[in-house]
Image (spheres, helix red, strand yellow):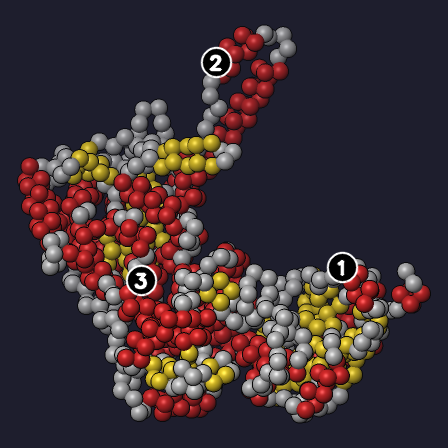
Amino acid sequence: MNMQETILTPDLAMIRQHLAAWAAPYIGTEYEDGLCEIAYTAPGGAAPDRARMFALDDLDDAANFAAQENARGANIYIGAALRAPDANPHKRGATLDFYAAAFAGCEADEHADKVAERIEAADLKGAIRVRTGQQPEKRVHHWLPLRELCDDPDAYTEALGALVAHVGADAKVRDSARVLRLGGTVNWITDPAKHAKGYIDELTAVITEDVPAADLDRLARLAPMPGWQPAHKGGKGGNGGPGEIIRNAAGLVTDGREAFWRQIVIAELAKYQRKTGADPTAEEIFDAAYSGFCHKTEGDDRWTSERGQRELRKRVQNTLRRLRLGHLARHGLYSVETGTGRDEAERVQWERDQNRLDRADPTPLIREMPEAGPYPVAALGPLREPAEAIARATEAPVAMCAASVLASAALAAQGHRDAETLNGTAPASLFLLTVAESGERKSTADRLAMRGVRDFEAELRTDYDIERDHWRDAHEVYKATRAKIVADKKADSAAKRADLQALGQEPPAPLKPHIVASSPTIEGIVKHLPELRASIGIMTEEGGALIGGHSMKAENRLATCASFSAMWDGSPLDRWRAGDGVESYTGRRFSAHILVQPVAAEALLSDPMANGQGLLARFLTCRPASRIGTRLRMEKDAAADAEIARFAARIRSLLSRDLPLAEGTRNELAPPVLPLSAEARDVLTDFAREVETAQAPGGPFEDARAFASKTAEHAARLAAVLTIYADPDAHEVTGETMAGATEIATFYANEAARLADAAIVPPEVADAERIRLWLLRSWGEPCISARAAAQRGPFKVTDRARKALRKLESHGWLIEANGAEVEGKPRREAWLIVREVQS
């Protein structure tokens, strides 16, 4: 260590000066509960990979901490923006921790004098300037004060990017998570390459002064300096700059997921307010946005993890806070509850309306889906009263309540008997998929239908706790006895083998007290089959998380579809894993009910793999008409409550019956077949012939052949469930029950045809609709060019993108605007985007 390095020490007074100037704009505002990030390197380290967060009234502690770590050889930095109050106090801040910004920072580590000249020429000046070094050339960080605090991370990032490009500063420093050198600390040079270039350890200096504040919008409009070509192209894991959304050839977001999340949240917020005339809760917006986010992103599972979801929820909460403060007026949004920002939001909306006055309404690319037919609730037989009771209690669509009741009954019935079909046997299991908007009371209805199942699981847990304690004792005795036999030095091998044989098998642990998987992955279910009961339900009220989660990622989708199909079929489930060997599980039964919002369901229903693998044909799918706006009865219905209680008791009773297990097993079913009566077989045969005829060209089921080909089996399964629910010891399925089952199966076949019909779109129209949705959800500029659409949009071929744009123009969704500015440059071929239809 040279003499200069020995005498360098941090200047505590100057550190405090920088911190005080940085914090002053936040004091006395709604943001003063935010945090100051002090980021630092390991002593002698290169990257600031650790941090401490400090409250604004603890800045003396922050200064002392910074000086202490700096004296130990760590380089010290300060977050350019204020961090959110709930940011992790011991980790580096992320873009999701952005709370507000009072300064636009830029870093001039090269050509500092020229950067300073360009800043001055733009009539700007830093209120805080930190000289970070003078050898081999001067290096300065400029902190330009903002006229108003900015809590919009997108606007902040946009302004930083424009400022950096205009003055030629370091392109890395242009997003809301960045840190800059803390003035008054020693700049330790740890990179040998920099030492070779003449860099030396130096004490940084701070200058603070009152200067005119800059307008954020003006910064965002600054033009790039001539020849500006930033070397930096974004952070690790992507090739886009901060705030930029990058997509792959399939149109999935691979970089810029946080910016994409913000766009989805804003879009769902606007949609909710238009539909309800009220402000949503954070959970409502998260539920509406999350499934679409999962389905349209790829390559980074950290956002679908539990921690990632917490971070996304935090961003939603911050967006709603900004809404209440009136800070979303630039998006044309204001809080219905507080009214703050209403004038500005209405002005923005008025300007948008004026832009649409001179054009005709665009014509839809895809025809609207017809309404669903009435549900044949009378055909439910013994399940009619429970379904109608739940519909009365919740005022939810009866089709949705019927699906929940059928799912609960199938779970209770499937372990006791198998169904006879026209061509053999099948599990008495049902897979159901119910599509409904947020607010349709999906969760409430399903919880009522599943009450008996949950009560039974509670009983299982009580028994399990007792059995587990007994097993632990027996297991300890077994292990001790076995160890004693093996360690007996007086006994020969034959005697030990005889004693071990007499000891018997290791006592198995009791089966887990779970019969419902609410947020499963296929791998997780199969992995735990050895310790679960033989009859399982896959029931989730958050189908978007399942459809858009790990199991349905591109690399897992084929295996997931195949496993779901095997579960419905009652086929063996195999598990192949390196190190674990191969396991095959037979005699299991699965029923499923997935409740999902339309945005996630549409992704699944149009998925070629889910269709091609026959998975969707195994689901009884419905999308009932909404009842929102008509639910005016507010009093409790005592008769409905009593019927729901009776249904729960019946389900619990069926689940409590002993299951018919294969000999020598404890969780492998060998259920007897519930035969069809002669009359039931005749009814099912006639029905199968009718459905077959309806699949002919021009027939009602021509576009739903995959489902229609399984409709007779669906009817047989439905009839078995209805029969077992009424009497698990019934001798046969009656003709009357089968007639009701065929009526229910017909309803679901019509739903399959209705949903399939809405999904049949010519490829060129599908391309146009896909790019239209991308423009509305992911493209923030008023105009688009073919080049920008190809580079940023779902298609990476310019000609394909251009054809889709021209199709949109022919339908009125785009207006020719050649010469319009796109991405900061006039484009010879451009279009104005029509974002809303006139009422």
Name the quarter where the C terminus is drawn. Answer: bottom left
Quadrant hosting residue 815: bottom left
Q: Position of residue 257 (x, y in %)?
A: 50, 65
Q: CA distance from mark 3 to mark 2?
A: 60 Å
Q: Which residue corresponds to the image point at 65% horizontal and 90% vertical from the top-left?
A: 122
Res. 726 visible in picture: no
Q: Which residue corresponds to the image point at 19% horizontal and 55% vertical from the top-left?
A: 704
> Is residue 159 shown left or right of residue 546?
right
Q: Which mark is residue 602?
A: 3
> Is residue 733 shown left or right of residue 194?
left
Query: What secondary structure is marked by label 2?
Result: helix
Please state which amino acid type lies under the numbered disc 1.
Answer: Gly
Mark sitting earlier along the chain (1/3): 1
Query: What secondary structure is marked by label 3?
Result: helix
Query: How crowded is the residue under tag 2: few (<14 C-alpha within 10 Å), some, or many (20+)?
Result: few
Q: Kindly report which numbered mark, 2 or 1, lies closer to the viewer in this rendering.
A: 1
Q: Which mark is residue 502?
A: 2
Query: How crowded is the residue under tag 1: few (<14 C-alpha within 10 Å), some, or many (20+)?
Result: some
Q: Position of residue 181 (x, y in %)?
A: 74, 72
Q: Kindly report which numbered mark, 3 or 2, lies closer to the viewer in this rendering.
A: 3
Q: CA distance from mark 1 to mark 3?
A: 50 Å
Q: Which residue corresponds to the image point at 20% horizontal and 36% vertical from the top-left?
A: 425
Query: How crowded is the residue under tag 3: few (<14 C-alpha within 10 Å), some, or many (20+)?
Result: some
Nearest the eye: 460 or 238: 238
Q: Which mark is residue 99?
A: none
Q: Which residue is mark 1?
A: 45
* Relative vertical location of residue 245 with respect to residue 750 in this rendering, above or below: below
